[in-house]
Image (spheres, helix red, strand yellow):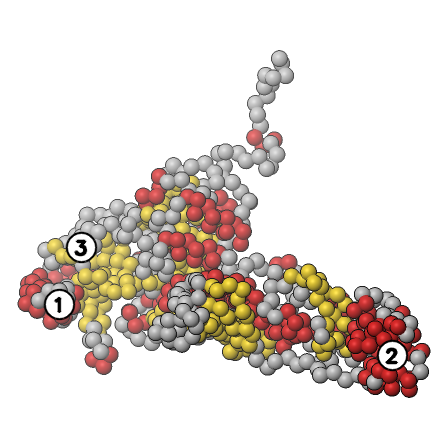
């Protein structure tokens, strides 16, 4: 048996929500036998020494990864011995020389023992056992036996919670949402300790905050407040991660868009979805170590600040109407673009060389002069028509003749002429000008009919 | 006194290799990516687009020749994604796929304000997997561009910033500045009459405004269309001509 007793130093600085449980979770990575005794933590490590390459290897790993700095620690063959050395601040002292103050069971009897001239564990053990038991009770004798390894030690062993759920009382009421990040940072650090102990990566988590009940506006409802005393902010990431930097940045972007109806006193963070995380394999070769963030982190950061609708990638569609051939979807939906996507390349359509590389989201109606379309000058038709019709099933029917045209100011453009110009143009005209009366739209349709067919700009060759 | 007077004319070739001769292009400092246009490569320092430096492309309003200019380099820039920040229109994926660019690599980022665009561009540069960043920053100031230039240099990325021609007079930290404009076309032909027998000469004029090396006096001529489109247009012209002669 080999025991380690650990206690945080009084001047320890930790950006953690709860130092004691964080320390226990850290210890549970190395051994399942972890117990808390007053302010100290007891670890029994003899069974796991082999896994970490012997006792020196284990100790090295143990104190390399400790979440709180600095900590005091001592070792011993029994838990009470390690604890006694920690209390006496004498890591190397033999057990007989330890003072009686360092034994918890003897503390109640200290004045009596002192009058007996008994100051150390060795002197206590030299006293007759029967008399000691009569005078001070069996507890002291048992503790002494346990400290010397004569009696077995059993503690309530600590366990790692299945789900992370931590609370933090803020030192002052927080009025603005971005300032919640300072508290949330401690909770995230705590989460990181838990994730490392469980060897998990987090996929989804939730930050909750409790509003000051005296000033809480219970009527307030928005995306984050449901009208109660609590507000919540869910946070998702595409790849399971233990990297708190990324989550912290995401949280910062999200909190910047939150308005608090009342000051916040408590924060709570809980994990919603986690995933087993394999260890990261490191490469020896310098070229494999690429500098920078990973793509999904960057995209999530962009989506968090700009909105998910603003970061899009293309989804090809099987349709022959140009605007339906591609759908630009938010990156958060579906998988991210793979590194090698050569397999997905389908043979290009036969007309693809006649298509422009820029497509206008909405076809732009073109001015006309003497029946000729204008766009940065008079357009000159070079190729076409390419006739295109969509089925009546697909909603608005599309009947168009596409042309490749040259504009003196803008180079090659892709324009089309609607074949059913008169009714369509009338409808569009009235839709474009909602303030205009129906008669106005009608007259517009008539002018369009007089002018002939309407032209639209739909793409640019670049 | 005699020591100060040059006894022999200065021999350029005798100078150490790292002394740059002002009449030649700078070589070898930056890694480059071939632009795919032989005429352009010949005039760019190192023979291609600089990796890890800002390339500024100035275009008149309404002209968007980015794809024509950049597509060959993007096609061969590896499997990493290409981020478009603040693009003026939607890229038409099937057409780009036909020219060899896998559309799955494109990520389209729309940012509402100038500050947001700069931020998004910088974030994109800081990504390890991104192959190239194309940003449309019409109102960016010199110090903001400098920041992007630093980020591109730190992470060794292809960075192209598209700006209006009006920005030509402003100072720029870009390592390479190009001005692109479509070549003046022939006189417009009316719709009702058949198109002229000679298709007007369409080309891209590329002025190299700034590069590491001597200024370029004459603009470069690049074809404004892909070879396949040219073929289709030519055949379409020929067809129209045939119809006209037949009718006559």
Q: Is residue B155 above or below residue B93?
A: above
For the residues labelled 1 and 3, the Cα–Cα distance comes to 22 Å
Dot 2 crowding, Cα within 10 Å, few <14, some 14–19, many 20+: some
Instruction: Looking at the picture, tell me which residue is in the foreground, A86 or B119.
Output: A86
What residue sits right under mark 3 in the picture? A374
Q: Could you say which quadrant of the image residue A326 lies in?
A: bottom left
Q: Earlier in the sequence, mark 1 or mark 3?
A: 3
Instruction: Looking at the picture, tell me which residue is in the foreground, A458 or B88.
Output: B88
Dot 1 crowding, Cα within 10 Å, few <14, some 14–19, many 20+: many
Give residue A148's mark.
2
Q: Could you say which quadrant of the image residue A168 lies in?
A: bottom right
Q: What secondary structure is marked by label 1?
A: helix
Q: Name the residue rendered at 61%, 74% in the picture.
A: A194
For the residues labelled 2 and 1, the Cα–Cα distance comes to 96 Å
Q: What secondary structure is marked by label 2?
A: helix
Give residue A430's mark.
1
Residue B215 position, x and y percent, is 42, 37
Q: Which is in the foreground here, disc 1 or disc 3?
A: 1
Q: Is residue A84 visible?
A: no
Give residue A111's mark.
none
Q: Is residue A42 left or right of residue B86?
A: right
Instruction: Looking at the picture, tell me which residue is in the foreground, B165 or A1.
Output: A1
């Amino acid at each position: 048996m080999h025991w380690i007793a650990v206690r945080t130093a009084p001047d320890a600085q930790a950006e953690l929500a709860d130092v004691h449980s964080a320390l226990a979770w850290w210890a549970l990575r190395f051994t399942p036998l972890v117990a808390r005794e007053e302010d100290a933590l007891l670890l029994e490590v003899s069974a796991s020494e082999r896994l970490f390459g012997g006792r020196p290897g284990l100790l090295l790993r143990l104190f390399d990864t400790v979440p709180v700095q600095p900590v005091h620690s001592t070792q011993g063959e029994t838990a009470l011995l390690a604890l006694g050395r920690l209390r006496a601040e004498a890591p190397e002292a033999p057990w007989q020389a330890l003072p009686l103050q360092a034994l918890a069971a003897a503390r109640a009897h200290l004045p009596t023992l002192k009058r007996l001239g008994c100051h150390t564990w060795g002197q206590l053990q030299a006293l007759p056992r029967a008399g000691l038991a009569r005078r001070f009770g069996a507890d002291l004798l048992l503790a002494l036996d346990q400290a010397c390894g004569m009696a077995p030690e059993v503690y309530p062993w600590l366990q790692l919670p299945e789900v992370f759920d931590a609370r933090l009382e803020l030192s002052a009421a927080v009025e603005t949402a971005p300032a919640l990040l300072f508290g949330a940072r401690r909770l995230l650090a705590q989460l990181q300790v838990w994730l490392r102990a469980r060897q998990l990566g987090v996929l989804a988590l939730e930050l909750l905050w409790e509003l000051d009940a005296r000033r809480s506006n219970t009527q307030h409802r928005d995306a984050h407040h449901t009208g109660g005393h609590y507000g919540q902010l869910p946070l998702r990431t595409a790849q399971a991660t233990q990297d708190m930097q990324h989550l912290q940045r995401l949280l910062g972007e999200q909190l910047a868009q939150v308005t608090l109806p009342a000051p916040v006193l408590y924060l709570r963070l809980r994990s919603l979805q986690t995933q087993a995380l394999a260890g990261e394999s490191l490469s020896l070769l310098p070229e494999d170590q690429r500098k920078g963030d990973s793509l999904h982190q960057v995209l999530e950061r962009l989506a968090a600040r700009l909105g998910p609708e603003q970061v899009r990638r293309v989804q090809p569609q099987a349709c022959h109407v140009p605007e339906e051939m591609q759908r630009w979807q938010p990156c958060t939906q579906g998988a991210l673009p793979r590194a090698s996507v050569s397999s997905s390349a389908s043979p290009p359509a036969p007309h693809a060389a006649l298509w422009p590389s820029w497509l206008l989201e909405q076809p732009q109606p073109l001015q006309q002069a003497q029946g000729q379309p204008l766009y940065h000058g008079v357009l000159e038709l070079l190729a076409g028509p390419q006739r295109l019709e969509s089925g009546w099933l697909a909603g608005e029917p599309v009947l168009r003749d596409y042309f490749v045209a040259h504009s003196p100011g803008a180079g090659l453009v892709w324009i089309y002429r609607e074949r059913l110009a008169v009714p369509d143009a009338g409808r569009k005209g009235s839709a474009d000008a909602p303030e205009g009366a129906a008669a106005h739209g009608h007259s517009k349709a008539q002018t369009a009919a007089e002018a002939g067919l309407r032209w639209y700009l739909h793409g640019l060759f670049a | 006194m005699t020591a100060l007077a040059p006894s022999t004319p200065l021999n350029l070739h005798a100078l150490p290799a790292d002394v740059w001769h002002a009449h030649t292009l700078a070589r070898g400092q930056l890694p480059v990516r071939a632009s795919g246009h032989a005429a352009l490569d010949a005039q760019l320092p190192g023979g291609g687009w600089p990796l890890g430096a800002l390339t500024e492309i100035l275009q008149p309003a309404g002209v968007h020749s980015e794809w024509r200019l950049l597509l060959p380099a993007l096609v061969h820039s590896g499997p990493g994604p290409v981020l478009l920040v603040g693009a003026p229109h939607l890229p038409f994926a099937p057409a780009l796929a036909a020219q060899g660019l896998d559309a799955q690599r494109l990520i389209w980022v729309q940012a509402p304000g100038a500050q947001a665009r700069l931020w998004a561009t910088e974030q994109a540069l800081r990504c390890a997997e991104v192959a190239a960043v194309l940003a449309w920053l019409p109102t960016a100031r010199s110090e903001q561009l400098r920041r992007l230039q630093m980020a591109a240099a730190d992470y060794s990325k292809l960075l192209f910033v598209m700006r209006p021609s009006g920005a030509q007079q402003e100072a720029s930290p870009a390592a390479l500045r190009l001005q692109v404009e479509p070549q003046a076309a022939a006189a417009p032909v009316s719709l009702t009459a058949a198109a002229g027998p000679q298709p007007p000469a369409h080309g891209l004029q590329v002025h190299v405004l700034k590069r590491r090396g001597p200024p370029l006096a004459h603009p470069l001529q690049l074809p404004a269309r892909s070879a396949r489109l040219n073929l289709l247009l030519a055949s379409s012209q020929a067809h129209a001509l045939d119809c006209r002669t037949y009718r006559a």
